[in-house]
Image (cartoon, rainbow, N blue to C red):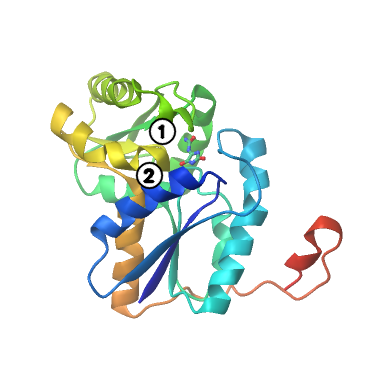
Amino acid sequence: MRIRVVNPNTTRAMTETIERCAKAVAGPGTRLDAVTSEMGPASIESHYDEALSIPGLLAAIQRGEQEGIDGYVIACFGDPGLDAARELAGGPVLGIAEAAMHAASHLGCGFSVVTTLNRTIGRAGELAHRYGMQRFCRGVHACEIPVLALETDPQARKIVTEACRVAVEADGSDAIVLGCAGMADLCEHIRDEIGVPVVDGVAAATLTVQSLLTLGVRKSGRGEFAAPLTKPYSGLLSSFGV
Ligand code: 2AL
């Protein structure tokens, strides 16, 4: 099976981290690669960034469909463009927030999300509601490290770890969900340091897609997620007419 992880921001160094973490959990029969969006913001940490990351993400899904990719992971915690990507793809498409929250719900009575900037808290909370996870999501916390600084700030690992420790205590939660794809490589360290399960959505979504493909199921094309209707698109988006 072929699984493609799409980093919807345009930062290649982050895609490399994401690919390493996804490959670390993929099974021997899985051919996995990660691709970087070819247009859009360098990082996604506002509603504006998120909206403008979606064309690049959808272009990557369109290319994947032409190449025969079986399933996809959207490697950004806002799960940008998830519904539209599901319309385009024949196989399963999973967002990392969706996968991580569901995985964490199996591990205890409640989890805390630790995200990057304070301004991303609203989106994470909204997704918990959307996925029916509000019963498990005890709180969403920011570590106040911008996405790209996760790669460059030498203090990042320590700051995120401490934010996770504080979140578990403050919320009385049993597990942590990491709120950014750029935190994927911190997962094991944080787990060892704070002693509760820590779920990285890149790994969780990769394994969920792999499991669905192993089950032999594809995305349902019956209703809302059927392929979008053919029509002309104009201007900068003229190549998106399907
Ligand atoms: C993210 C993420 O996962 N990738 C990105 O560019 N922004 N999430 C976040 N909470 O800032």
Mark 1 residue's CB less than 8 Å from ligand 1: no
Give the residue displayed 43% in from the left and 70% down from the top. 71
**Could you tell me how many numbered marks the image carries?**
2
Q: Position of residue 64 (x, y in %)?
A: 53, 71
Q: Quadrant of the C terminus?
A: bottom right
From the viewer's perspective, is 194 left or right of 181?
A: left
Q: Quadrant of residue 107?
A: top left
Question: Would you name the residue on which mark 1 appears?
Answer: 151
Give the residue displayed 45% in from the left and 64% down from the top. 72
Q: Position of residue 13 (x, y in %)?
A: 45, 44
> Looking at the image, which is closer to me, 86 or 233?
233
Q: Residue furthest right?
A: 235
Q: Quadrant of residue 24?
A: bottom left
Q: Position of residue 161 (x, y in %)?
A: 27, 25
In this picture, is 158 found above or below 228? Answer: above
Question: Would you name the residue on which mark 2 appears?
Answer: 133
> Looking at the image, which is closer to me, 177 or 116?
116
Give the residue displayed 22% in from the left and 32% down from the top. 190
In this picture, is 179 found above or below 165? Answer: below
Give the residue displayed 55% in from the left and 38% down from the top. 43
Q: CA distance from mark 2 to mark 1?
A: 29 Å
From the viewer's perspective, is 167 left or right of 126?
A: left
Q: Position of residue 175 (x, y in %)?
A: 23, 36
Q: Mark 2 is on which residue type?
A: Met
In this picture, is 1 found above or below 82? Answer: below
Q: Mark 1 is on which residue type?
A: Glu
